């Protein structure tokens, strides 16, 4: 400390660092003000405004259900997994701009392999609107 307790009669040996701190803070402020601000451009792909209005009437969603036995139901009609992709392609081909959404609901006991095949079929058919529905079980 820089204060003497009165017991010693000699000079204080501690250095007063307050002027040093003041000079360093002034230099820091000068460097911060005079340093040029460097900007780096960052490329961001923002969505572009569309002049096309949304479709007037969206199509009814397709309900796709996968049960625990590995069966796939297209709007409550049993469908083979092998013909699913062709059916999805036909649906997309009817109106590519106004596709119906697919709502996929799976059972808790459903096999992941069947689920992956359904998603692959949707991707291969260029389905753009895929939703996952939580079942009530």
Image: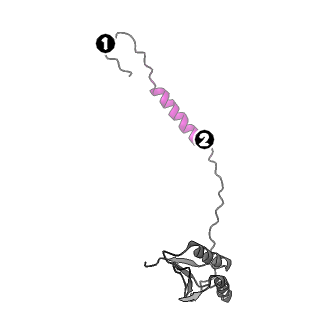
| Tag 2 secondary structure | helix
Q: Residue at x 53, y 38 (%)?
A: 29
The scheme the figure's colours follow is: one colour
Compute the Cα span from label 1 to label 2: 49 Å
Predominant SS along the magenta part: helix
| Magenta residues (range) | 12-36
Q: Is residue 60 left or right of residue 40?
A: left
| 91 inside magenta stretch | no
Q: Position of residue 12 (x, y in %)?
A: 40, 15
- Residue 10 coordinates in the image, percent (x, y): 38, 10
Residue 15: x and y in percent read 45, 20
Taking the view exactly as shown, the residue that stands out farthest to the front is 69
Residue at the spot of label 1: 7
Q: Is residue 90 left or right of residue 101?
A: right
Viewer-side residue, 30 vs 123: 123
Q: State the residue at coordinates (66%, 56%).
A: 41
Classify 10 Å Cα crowding around label 1: few (below 14), some (14-19), many (20 and above). Answer: few
**Residue 59 or residue 70, whichever sits in front:** 70
Which quarter shows the N terminus? Answer: top left
Figure check: 10 above or below 40 = above
- Vertical arrangement, residue 45 with respect to residue 41, above or below: below
Q: Is residue 59 visible?
A: no
Image quadrant in which you'd find residue 102: bottom right
Residue 6 appears in view: yes
Which of the two marks, 1 or 2, is nearer to us in this view?
1
Q: Residue at x 50, y 75 (%)?
A: 109
Q: Mark 2 — residue?
A: 34
Is 50 above or below relative to 1?
Answer: below
Residue 96 position in % (x across, y down) = 66, 84
Specify which label sits upstream in the sequence, 1 or 2.
1
């Amino acid at each position: 400390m820089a204060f003497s307790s009165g017991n010693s009669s000699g000079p204080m040996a501690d250095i007063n660092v307050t002027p040093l701190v003041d000079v360093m803070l002034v230099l820091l402020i000068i460097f911060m003000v005079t340093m040029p601000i460097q900007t780096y451009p960052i490329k961001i792909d923002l969505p572009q405004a569309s002049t096309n209005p949304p479709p007037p009437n969206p199509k009814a969603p397709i309900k796709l259900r996968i049960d625990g036995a590995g069966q796939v139901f297209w709007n409550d009609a049993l469908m083979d997994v092998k013909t699913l992709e062709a059916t999805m392609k036909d649906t997309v081909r009817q109106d590519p701009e106004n596709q119906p959404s697919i709502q996929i609901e799976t059972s808790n006991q459903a096999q992941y392999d069947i689920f992956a095949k359904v998603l692959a079929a949707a991707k291969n058919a260029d389905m753009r609107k895929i939703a996952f529905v939580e079942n009530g079980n």
